[in-house]
Image (cartoon, grey):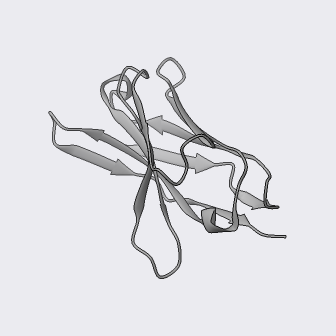
Amino acid sequence: QVQLVESGGGLVQPGGSLRLSCAASGFPFSMYAMSWHRQAPGRSRELVARVESGGGRTTYADSVKGRFTISKDNAKKMVYLEMNSLKPEDTAVYYCNARNYGYGTDYWGQGTQVTVSS
């Protein structure tokens, strides 16, 4: 069955770094665009970063540009989010998403908590 399993979240001080990972299985990973989203308490889920199916073109939310980097490894069926210069406002549950517009399919992971605090 389809699985997206996030890992790498945790507690980090402001200015610190974390690397989130998402392991995918159960669907043709190389044909899916992958993205990271986040949801802070009391707020709606928002797109953080997206990478196209081939792992080339990327897009970022303005709030994370220059600090976060998304990457996709089709051979390993993994997607990563490198987060640097973390701020308290980056605190949220981070979710991995896989989407194929042609198939009309959309999958979500269970989320991983990121807390930025001193």
For the C terminus, the quadrant is bottom right
Position of residue 27 measured from the top left corner of the image (x, y, whole percent): 34, 33
- 78 vs 65: above or below: above
Position of residue 49 measured from the top left corner of the image (x, y, whole percent): 46, 44
Front in this rendered view, residue 103 or 59 = 59
Residue at left offset 34%, top offset 34%: 33
Front in this rendered view, residue 59 or 115 = 59
| In-image side of 25 versus 69 (left or right) | left
Residue at left offset 71%, top offset 55%: 86
| In-image side of 15 versus 88 (left or right) | right
- 113 vs 29: above or below: below
Q: Quadrant of residue 43?
A: bottom left
- 63 vs 34: above or below: below
Position of residue 89 measured from the top left corner of the image (x, y, whole percent): 62, 67
Residue at left offset 38%, top offset 20%: 54
For the N terminus, the quadrant is top left
Front in this rendered view, residue 55 or 103 = 55
Residue at left offset 36%, top offset 29%: 52
Position of residue 116 measured from the top left corner of the image (x, y, whole percent): 73, 65
| In-image side of 13 versus 5 (left or right) | right
- 8 vs 42: above or below: above
Front in this rendered view, residue 85 or 107 = 85
Q: How many marks?
A: 0
| In-image side of 40 versus 102 (left or right) | right
Q: Quadrant of residue 101?
A: top left
Which residue is most to the bottom? 42
